[in-house]
Image (cartoon, helix red, strand yellow):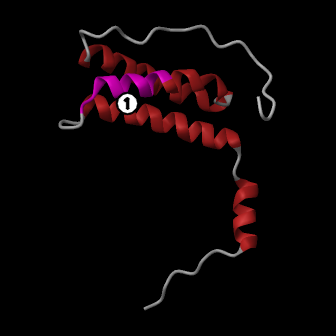
C-alpha cells in the first residue's frame, strides 16, 4: 500500500508564496455567509444566535474584500440577512454599522 508522500520544503514554500491575504479574506467571508445560511436553514442544526455571529463577522470583514469579489458576496450576505429576519422574528436583526475608522496596525500593538 502506497502512503501519500509528504510535500517537500520547496513545494511548501511555493504554496506559501502563492497564497494571498485577499484570497483568504474572500474565502473566510464566503465561509461565514455559508455557515450563517446553514445555521438558519438546516433542520437539527438551526441556531439563529450562531447565524447572527457569522453574519456580523462577515459584515465586519466585507470592507476587506477586494472590489471585484464584493458584489456576489454582498448579494449572498443580503439574502442571508433576509433569511435571518424570517427565521429569528423575535430577535433584533443585525444593524448596519458605519465602517470602522482606519487604524494603522503595527506588530506588537
Give the residue drawn at x 35%, y 16%. 82
What percent of the width, then of the height, locates residue 97?
55, 8
- 51 on left or right of 31: left
Looking at the image, which is closer to me, 56 or 42?
56
In the picture, the quarter occupied by the N terminus is: bottom left
Q: Is residue 52 left or right of residue 23?
A: left
Task: Give the image location of residue 42, x and y in percent.
Answer: 24, 36
Question: Residue at the left extreme?
Answer: 44
Q: Is 84 on the left-hand or right-hand side of 28? A: left
Secondary structure of residue under mark 1: helix
According to the picture, the residue beneath numbered tag 1 turns out to be 36
Residue at the location (32% across, 35% down)? 38
Q: Position of residue 35 (x, y in %)?
A: 39, 36
10 Å crowding of disc 1: few (<14), some (14-19), many (20+): many
Q: Residue at x 55, y 41 (%)?
A: 27
Q: Nearer the viewer, residue 47 or 64?
A: 47
The residue most toward the front is 108
Q: Residue at x 18, y 36 (%)?
A: 43
Q: Which residues are magenta?
A: 46-56
| Quarter containing the C terminus | top right
Seen in the picture, residue 98 relative to 72 is either above or below; the reply is above
The quadrant holding residue 100 is top right
x, y (%) of residue 92?
34, 8
Amino acid at each position: 500500500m502506497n502512503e501519500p508522500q509528504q510535500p517537500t520544503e520547496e513545494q511548501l514554500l511555493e504554496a506559501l508564496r502563492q497564497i494571498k491575504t485577499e484570497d483568504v479574506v474572500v474565502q473566510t467571508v464566503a465561509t461565514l455567509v455559508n455557515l450563517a445560511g446553514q445555521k438558519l436553514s438546516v433542520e437539527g442544526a438551526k441556531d439563529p444566535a450562531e447565524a447572527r455571529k457569522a453574519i456580523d463577522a462577515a459584515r465586519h470583514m466585507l470592507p476587506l474584500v477586494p472590489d471585484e469579489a464584493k458584489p456576489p458576496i454582498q448579494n449572498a450576505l443580503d439574502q442571508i440577512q433576509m433569511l435571518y429576519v424570517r427565521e429569528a422574528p423575535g430577535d433584533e436583526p443585525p444593524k448596519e454599522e458605519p465602517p470602522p475608522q482606519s487604524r494603522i496596525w503595527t506588530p506588537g500593538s
